């Protein structure tokens, strides 16, 4: 079985319970494979990044395997505005966040609600320089564990969505993203758009941000913010101390 998200965004949970931790979100138009059904709960695997979790069965639309395969083979088309609206023939407005998927709208067998979209779309690979412009659209977005939108986002959701909007695929978690790309030896070798990863005392990758010009970094910590970056890690000028210990810098593109 296969499905697609036809709501603005839905929580992807660690366990089949409304009280369970939200590990990620499924945004409008994202499609997935259904792995398991348990009463009102459905365990899914996201097509985009293979991330797994549980969603409420009432918050999905079933699609055929052929529709799933068709969407998976086509170019990804995304909403490029901070927030936009999907309209229906009855003039119902459904707000959708930045990065929502629009590829299915032209497929009548999937778009059974006759959704229409008249906002700004983006598709395909952009230049590396455009990563920073996209990242700045999320500036001051509140931190939310598992979040992927300007209304709440976590550190790896932020980097994944910025790269996705520019046509490049990152995995969901910071630890997974740290396995991608080419490692750089020094901060001085990095370019705006490269990723910086940070670890804890046990050596586990726990944080990621996007490097900017002049030794600055944009990252989600409390909110999406810009701080200084040096060879020790992230320096917060407000608290006058380092908040994250640098582990590695990766060039993805």
Image (spheres, helix red, strand yellow):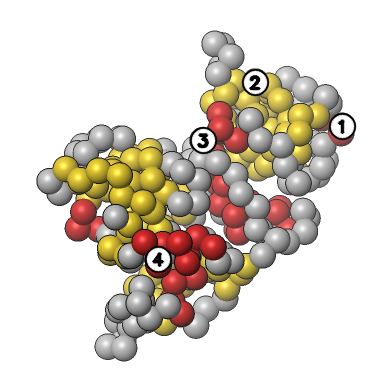
For residue 22, above or below residue 231:
below
Q: Secondary structure at mark 4?
A: helix
Q: What's the distance in space between the residues labelled 4 and 3, CA to CA?
A: 29 Å
Q: What's the distance in space between the residues labelled 1 and 2, CA to CA?
A: 17 Å
The structure residue drawn at horizontal position 61% and vertical position 69%, both measured from the top left corner, is 122
x, y percent for residue 70: 47, 67
In the rendered structure, find residue 188 and report the number of the disc placed on it.
1
First in sequence: mark 4 or mark 3?
A: 4
First in sequence: mark 2 or mark 4?
A: 4
Q: Are marks 3 and 1 in contact (CB under 8 Å)?
A: no
Q: Residue furthest right?
A: 188
Q: Which residue is mark 4?
A: 66
The structure residue drawn at horizontal position 33% and vertical position 65%, both measured from the top left corner, is 64
Q: Which is nearer the eye, 185 or 67?
A: 67
First in sequence: mark 1 or mark 4?
A: 4
The structure residue drawn at horizontal position 65% and vertical position 20%, both measured from the top left corner, is 245
For residue 189, above or below residue 3:
above
| Relative horizontal placement of residue 241, taking residue 17 as reference (left or right) | right
Q: Which is nearer the eye, 217 or 189?
A: 189
Q: Secondary structure at mark 1?
A: helix
Q: What's the distance in space between the residues labelled 1 and 4, CA to CA?
A: 48 Å
Which image quadrant for residue 17?
A: top left
Q: Residues within 10 Å of mark 3 (few under 14, many from 20)?
A: many
| Relative horizontal placement of residue 164, taking residue 32 as reference (left or right) | right
For residue 117, above or below residue 247:
below
Q: Residues within 10 Å of mark 1 (few under 14, many from 20)?
A: few
Q: Is residue 100 visible?
A: no
Q: Nearer the viewer, mark 3 or mark 2?
A: 3
First in sequence: mark 3 or mark 1?
A: 3
Q: Residue furthest front?
A: 66
In the rendered structure, find residue 245 and report the number of the disc placed on it.
2
Which image quadrant for residue 15?
A: top left
């Amino acid at each position: 079985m296969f499905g697609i998200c036809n709501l603005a965004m839905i929580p992807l949970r660690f366990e089949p319970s409304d009280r369970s931790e939200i590990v990620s979100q499924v945004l409008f138009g994202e499609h997935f494979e259904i792995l398991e059904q348990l009463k009102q709960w459905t365990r899914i695997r996201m097509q985009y990044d293979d991330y797994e979790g549980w969603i409420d069965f009432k918050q999905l639309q079933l699609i055929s395997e052929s529709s799933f395969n068709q969407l998976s083979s086509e170019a990804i088309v995304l909403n490029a505005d901070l927030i936009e609206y999907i309209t229906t023939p009855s003039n119902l407005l459904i707000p959708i966040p930045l990065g929502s998927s629009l590829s299915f709208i032209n497929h009548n067998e999937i778009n059974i609600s006759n959704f229409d979209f008249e906002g700004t779309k983006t598709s395909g690979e952009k230049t590396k320089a455009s990563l920073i412009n996209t990242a700045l659209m999320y500036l001051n977005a509140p931190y939310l564990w598992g979040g992927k939108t300007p209304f709440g986002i976590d550190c790896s959701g932020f980097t994944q969505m910025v790269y996705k909007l520019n046509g490049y695929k990152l995995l969901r978690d910071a630890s997974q993203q740290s396995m991608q790309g080419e490692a750089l030896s020094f901060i001085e070798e990095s370019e705006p758009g490269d990723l910086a990863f940070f670890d804890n005392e046990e050596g586990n990758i726990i944080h990621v941000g996007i490097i900017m010009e002049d030794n600055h970094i944009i990252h989600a910590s409390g909110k999406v913010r810009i701080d200084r970056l040096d060879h020790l890690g992230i320096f917060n000028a407000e608290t006058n101390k380092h908040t994250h210990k640098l582990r590695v810098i990766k060039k993805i593109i």
